[in-house]
Amino acid sequence: MQDGQSNGSVRLGGQKSGGVAQFAFEVVARLVAGDVTTTGPLREDLIERFSWAVIDPELGRFDAMKPDLRRARISPTLFADRYIPEIARRLGRGWEDDTMSFAQVTMGASRLQAILREIGSDWVADQGVGYTAAGDRSTVLLIVPQGEQHTLGVFVLIGQLRRRGVSVCLRIGPSDDDVRSLLGERSFDGAMISIATPQKLPICRLLVKTLKEVTTGRLHVAVGGAALQELGDEANVIGADVVTNDLTTAMFGLGMTTAAMQI
């Protein structure tokens, strides 16, 4: 089963025009391979400067920090898994505190997602540690409910799953009929639903119900996302087999193998 996304996937580095794609390409070009930092505390100075760089329309702040970014020798994986989510949180706080405009935050989020796609353009499930020569790897259906506007965290999750050897099929805003049709054509070892806002809880419940009905309960479902922080105990009545923002816990709840849970 091949990895798939409902909205397609392109390698941004191949684009010749400027803008978001060029910004992403420039960032990734400075995340070197080889002797790099893969663990340890995040560098506050880089997070702060990069948070402002991604909202600079003229890229002036980013141009000034290019040498520092390269000298930091941060691995692409570390940047994708830890720096990008933290920078995104800083942008969100900036919007809440009125220190950043909606336009700035939107531009920053777009650039972060472009960087993430560029970093992960070569991450495929059959290169992950959970893959075997016999092609025995786990497959997951990842759903973002209708109406969700923010998908940056979802693409971070996709990269983490693929590096664990999990084949991911992403569907953004599918209808009930879309889900039923897909499950009639393909089989999955588990399903994940990501909800960013509590208002999508009713839609999430319907999605879980559909996933269970079509597979007569065989398909295990995990629910996660930023909304869990606000929902609290209410999230436990969604009907999913596991409700968590911890990827290892989610994979265990879906019955993934030990090898696939390693990174």
Image (cartoon, helix red, strand yellow):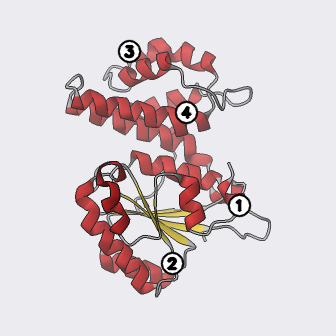
- Against 86, is 120 above or below? below
Q: Earlier in the sequence, mark 1 or mark 3?
A: 3
Count residues near mark 1 (Cα–Cα under 10 Å), then give few for <14, some for 14-19, many for 20+: few
Query: Residue 140 location in percent, x, y?
Result: 54, 67
Task: Please tell me the numbered disc located at residue 79.
Answer: 4
Label 4 residue SS: helix
Q: Amino acid at mark 4?
A: Phe
Q: Amino acid at mark 2?
A: Leu
Left or right of 157 on screen, residue 230: left
Label 1 residue SS: helix
Query: Camera-side residue: 74 or 229?
Result: 229
Asked if one can make out residue 130 in the rendered structure from this viewpoint, the answer is: no
Q: Amino acid at mark 1?
A: Thr
Label 3 residue SS: helix
Q: Which residue is mark 3?
A: 60
- Against 225, is 185 above or below? below
Q: Distance from label 2 to label 3 (Cα)?
A: 49 Å
Q: Earlier in the sequence, mark 2 or mark 1?
A: 2
Q: Nearer the viewer, mark 1 or mark 3?
A: 1
Count residues near mark 2 (Cα–Cα under 10 Å), then give few for <14, some for 14-19, many for 20+: some
Count residues near mark 3 (Cα–Cα under 10 Å), then give few for <14, some for 14-19, many for 20+: few
Left or right of 236 on screen, residue 13: right
